[in-house]
Image (cartoon, grey):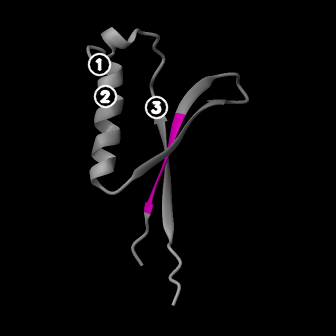
Amino acid sequence: MFVLSKWEYIVLPLRTKISISRISQKKNAVIQNVQDELNSLGTEGWELVSVQNVRLETGSLFTVAYLKREANS
């Protein structure tokens, strides 16, 4: 018997307006906050699927992360 998986998704806005070198990355609080949030979601079973820059009709640009996890039946 084939069991079809069910998934749930979240779209997480990320505050990442930064431009830094790899060397200073570990010291950057913004990056550390994003990593901490993604790691926290990972412990809850969420898997990062994609990251995308999105431009609103107003012209504002922001970054979102798409995550999924298997839904509880």
Q: Nearer the viewer, residue 17 or 51?
A: 51
Secondary-structure class at tag 3: strand
Q: CA distance from mark 2 to mark 1?
A: 6 Å
At which x and y percent is residue 32? Answer: 29, 25
Q: Which mark is residue 33?
A: 2
Q: Residue at x 30, y 55 (%)?
A: 44
Q: Earlier in the sequence, mark 2 or mark 3?
A: 3
Of 37 and 20, nearer the camera is 20
Quadrant in which the C terminus is drawn: bottom left
**In the depicted view, which residue is nearer to us: 59 or 38?**
38
Kind of residue indicated by mark 1: Ala
Q: Which residues are magenta?
A: 64-69
Residue at the (50%, 73%) spot, across then down: 5
Circle 1 SS class: helix
41 relative position to 18: left or right? left
Tell me whether circle 2 and circle 1 mark residues in contact (CB < 8 Å). Answer: yes
73 horizontally vs 36: left or right? right
Query: Which of the labelled discs sits on residue 15, or is there none?
Result: none
Q: Disc 1 designates what residue?
A: 29
Q: Is residue 65 magenta?
A: yes
Q: Amino acid at mark 3?
A: Leu
- Identify the residue at the far bottom of this view: 1
Q: Which residue is mark 3?
A: 14
Residue 48 position in % (x across, y down)? 45, 46
Residue in view at x 35 percent, y 23 percent? 31
